[in-house]
Image (spheres, coloured by chain):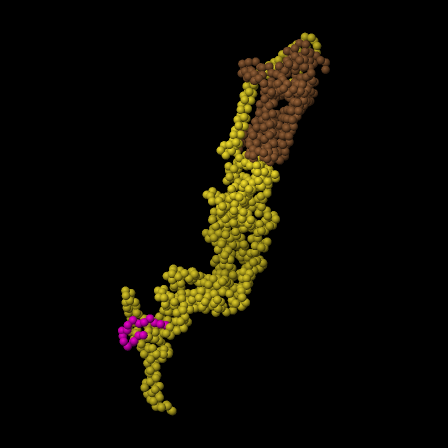
Amino acid sequence: MSKHAWRAKQTPMEPAPPRQSLPLRGFPAWFPGLILTLAVLLCSASAWAASDSETCLACHGNKGMSTKHGAKVVSLFVDGKRFSPSVHSGVGCTGCHSDLDVKNLPHGKPAKVTCGNCHTQEQELYAKSLHGKAASRGDQLAPHCVDCHGNHDILPVKDKKSAVAPLSIPFLCGKCHQEGTAVAKRQDIGQHNILENYTESIHGEALLKKGLSVAANCASCHTAHSILPHTDPNSSIARRNIAATCTKCHSQIEAVHRKTIRGELWEKEANVLPACVDCHQPHKVRQVFYDFGMANADCMRCHSNPNLKAKDGRTMLVNDIEVAGSRHAKIACSQCHSEVNVSHVRPCETITHKVECSKCHEAVGEDFGRSIHGQLTAKNDANAPGCKDCHGTHGILGKVDPRSTTFPTNIPGLCSKCHSEGKKAALRYTGTQHNIITNYTESIHGKGLLESGLTVTATCTSCHTAHRILPAKDPTSTVNPANVPTTCGKCHIGIEAQFVNSVHSPTVTSTTKELPVCSTCHTAHTIRRTDEAGFELGIMNTCGRCHAEVAKTYFDTYHGKVSRLGYTKAAKCYDCHGSHDIANVNDPRSHLSRANVVQTCRKCHASATRRFAGYLTHATHHDPKKYPILFFAFWAMTGLLVGTFLVGGIHTILWLPRAFQMRRELKEAEAREEAALLAEAEAEGEPPSPPSEKR
Amino acid sequence: MTPSIDRSSPTAHEGEHHPVGLEFVRFVPLERGIHATMVVSFLSLALTGMTLKFSYTPWARAISHLLGGFETAGNIHRFAALVMFSIFVTHLVSLRNLKNREYGGSWLALVLGPNSMVPMLKDGKEFVATIKWFLGKGQRPQYGRWTYWEKFDYFAVFWGIFIIGSTGLTLWFPILFTRILPGWFINLATIIHSDEALLATGFIFTVHFFNTHLRPEKFPMDVVVFTGQMPLAELKRDKPLEYELLHSKGEIKRHLAEAHPEIVVKAIRVFAWVALSIGFSIVVGIIYAMIFAYR
């Protein structure tokens, strides 16, 4: 194909001018003829080209035109009606299929069209790209020019119907790059749900929902033909090139971007843009709202009216002073109530959903969704708390503000709105904890927080977390027994460090029995001071719940008996065994190991010796195998006791009848004597003698 | 008081004229004082000890609280133990004095004499005879100064003080004792101390109370050990052998003394009843603790 033919414009064929000699002054006579011939040649070239297409279309315009490649039937139909308006119609068939000889028909199989014959630059770029390399490897899934652009119906890019029109690009690329396609299955390119994410992103929404054709589409960032992986330093999405890619559109970003993000400077080096994707996920670019369009004053035109009410009678008055004093003061109404539509007279009539706090508070929203509160909300449970139930709406103050509902000292009151006895959470609660708030208020944490105002002490959210609240049965819950030591250890670091190495920790002891955790001995909500007499004496019953036998024997000893009478200074379980660092007796770290036991006794018995420490703290006289001497001694003494009582008792019982008899006889003797004396007195006429001795 | 014919007993011997209003002195003041002190210390020991032994019962906790808390109860217990030890020592000293005074300095004479507390063959015979009398198969034996059950009570105290005292000291000074004894002796001492004390208190508050103080023929109560005196006729009836012995030696008169004023006797009775009641209550508490509330 000659260059001249290519230069032919896309104009309809002009009929050849009639041959005639025109008198032209100063030119040789043969000049017009020359001009004419040239014109004819030129026109015939295009005509030839045109008639070339016509020639081809004579056969290929037939819908049934096909051939066989092996078993496959391939259609050779070319729709002339689509080819004519295409960009290549002026080039004609042979412009691309240049190896074909129109004169010798029918022709053989044509060679594959090399678009790069004309489009050299694009071809070069493509050849170096991922797609091109895959194609040259013979990868069946690799896209060629025709897969994106089409072949006979290629329209200009500016044409809305073009396959590579901006609004079509996501769908074009998405044909291969979406979940479930052969490409997605074969290649893991590290990005998933690209199409879905892109559609939700600010670029996607602008392009696809609002038709903003200059919004970034796939080719804007990845380029059309030079698609390279981000690891390739020449790629438009290589880390060092990303800023240049994004600033193709966001050219003034340096001037308007926030200068500090999360306490750090945005530009790490002066005047060197960071990689945008460090913060903005490439396909999920978050929607950021700008307070243009819907100003707060617009909202307040209606919502400053105290008589404004919703259909159900709720007041719709918004206290803008409250908002101005809140943490959301700098945030426009429309940023939370984002469904407003400025173009409506009553913009809020397009609001269909409650405010979605997680749009900005993403991480919290995700946590909340997994929590029990979130699960109930998802089930549309009427009692489920949403964000505003705890945080409020327009007057949200941060948790460091003492007036905030989420300030540490206010938290128990906040949770008690639902979780105190008789309230909605307590009514459906099926667990073991009751009177939680009352108990907590009396506990050491509660007193510290509410009476002493110690804000760093544990409140509800310290243990249960604020947004990841889950019931204890859930294995990921912070209050699940397996996780309790870690939860308490957030503050009680030293104790957790001790506990983890103690015999009660699952890392040390493997057993099928339930091992105790913090809440087992200290309870969950009635945690008291450990130097309180009530706790000290009560702990023995706590230990006794699992260690019933040794607890019983302990109560047989002096320490135990005296403790029962309320003596707190006698040795209790933890005085000897330790509390959080209990180790097996054979462990050299144990307080009761051979090396340490005398020292332990010396805590109270200052001059204790090793022999003294030989005292058997859990001895019992009930066990003949373990403590034979004690067993024998006990039964000997009991035998003595029984024997003595038997003998003495029988003796006494046998005595009784005789004793009563003697008593009767004595009384009779007394009576007789009395009578005799009285008679004597009567007889002698003397004053009666003093009666006999009284006893 | 004008002495007149002794009408206290129809069996009074001829020739013997003892003034009415005088009584036979059975126990000298020291003996009475020792017994009274022993009663007080014994009750203190029993009460404070039982609140510890039965600390699982509500009554024990209440009494412990009443006594000023566990620590105070413990101090009372130890103090009463010291009193008991000193009573013991006092008694031994008084025995020595008695030996010197009445037995010519001879221990053997004291121990083997007619007033000895040491059990002898005669006691065995009397025991058998008494059982026979209980069963209606014989006469009441003629007892001497000390009956067999009184001798038993006497040595029971020796035994008790020895056993309970030694184990008690071990418990009081465990570190000192474990210099020589192994540590588990403390466990052993606990069992022995506790059970022997149970035996002692139980026995005293039941058998002894009956034998000595509450026998029906003595009803309401025999307080001779506190008053020290008893009517001569009673002596003659209860301890005929002793009466005979003294009478033959003409020593009765020496042992007579004026009766105490009524008020004194009344006061002594009150003391005795209080002690008795405390003892009974302890027994009731023990029975409750061991049978109904046992842990």
Residue A107 falls inside the magenta stretch: yes
Q: Is residue A481 left or right of residue B152?
A: left
Query: Could you tell me residue A70's position as x and y percent?
Result: 28, 66
Let me know if residue A514 appears in the view: yes
User: What residue is drawn where x is 52% and y is 61%?
Assistant: A334
Chain ID, brown in image:
B
Q: Is residue A559 left or right of residue A127?
A: right
Chain ID, yellow in image:
A
Image quadrant containing the N terminus of chain B: top right
Q: Residue B195 occupies which quadrant of the picture?
A: top right
Count up the numbered dots: 0
In this rendering, the answer to whether B242 lies above or below B196 is above
User: What residue is drawn where x is 39% and y is 61%?
Assistant: A187
Q: Residue furthest right?
A: B2
In this rendering, the answer to whether B125 lies above or below A553 is above
In this rendering, the answer to whether A448 lies above or below A651 is below
Residue A145 falls inside the magenta stretch: no
Q: As rendered, which of A254 and B75 lies closer to the eye?
A: B75
Q: Is residue A625 left or right of residue A107?
A: right
Query: Could you tell me residue A448's position as x and y percent?
Result: 59, 48
User: What residue is drawn where x is 47% and y is 52%?
Assistant: A375
Task: Name the main secondary structure of what is drawn in magenta.
Answer: loop
Q: Residue furthest top?
A: A683
Q: As rendered, which of A507 and B230 lies closer to the eye?
A: A507
Query: Could you tell me residue B78's position as x and y percent?
Result: 63, 32
Q: As rendered, which of B159 and A201 lies closer to the eye?
A: B159
Q: As rendered, which of A521 and B284 lies closer to the eye?
A: A521
Let me know if residue B210 appears in the view: no
Q: Which residues are magenta?
A: A99-115
